[in-house]
Amino acid sequence: MFVVIFGRPACPFCDRAKALAARLESTGAIEGHRYVDIQAEGITKADMEKTIGKPVHTVPQIFVDQTHVGGFTEFDRYVRDQALLTATS
């Protein structure tokens, strides 16, 4: 399982998503993750909307194995629903 996070600098939810992905990677729950700084890469929300297929109002926008999960809240819920972290992780 591979996670891609599209975010921007100074975004607390982007930071939380990166930290959660790093934690998942360190425990072996995912193979890896990549953070894409949309400002540095010149990616607009309109560009993301074309890929996702619906309006994008916030960042981060997170994909798991190329499937759009949503923002940090949805990613956190996905991790919990899939039991990717145990109580001791």
Image (cartoon, grey):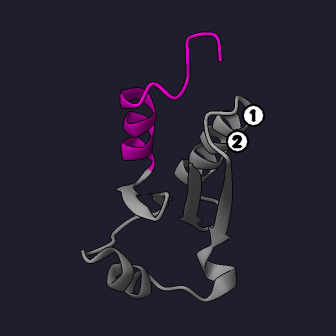
Residue at the (70%, 39%) spot, across then down: 25
At which x and y percent is residue 70?
37, 56
Query: What segment carries the magenta color?
Result: 72-89
Tally the marks.
Answer: 2
Q: Is residue 64 visible?
A: yes
Disc on res. 79: none
Please say if 61 is above or below 2. Answer: below
Residue 81 vs residue 59, the one in the foreground: 81
Q: Residue furthest right?
A: 26
Please say if 46 is above or below 23. Answer: below
At which x and y percent is residue 17?
57, 47
Residue 35 vs residue 65, the one in the foreground: 65
Please say if 52 is above or below 70. Answer: below
Looking at the picture, which amino acid does disc 2 mark?
Ala
- Pointer 2: what residue? 22
Contact flag, marks 2 and 1 (Cβ < 8 Å): yes
Q: Residues within 10 Å of mark 1 (few under 14, many from 20)?
A: few
- Pointer 1: what residue? 26
Mark 1 element type: helix
Residue at the (38%, 80%) spot, across then down: 51
Looking at the image, residue 27 sits to the left or right of residue 4; the answer is: right
Looking at the image, residue 34 sits to the left or right of residue 2; the answer is: right
Residue at the (69%, 82%) spot, across then down: 40
Looking at the picture, which amino acid does disc 1 mark?
Ser
Is residue 81 located in the magenta-colored stretch of the structure?
yes
Quadrant assignment for the C terminus: top right
Q: Nearer the observer, disc 2 or disc 1?
A: 1
Q: Is residue 9 visible?
A: no
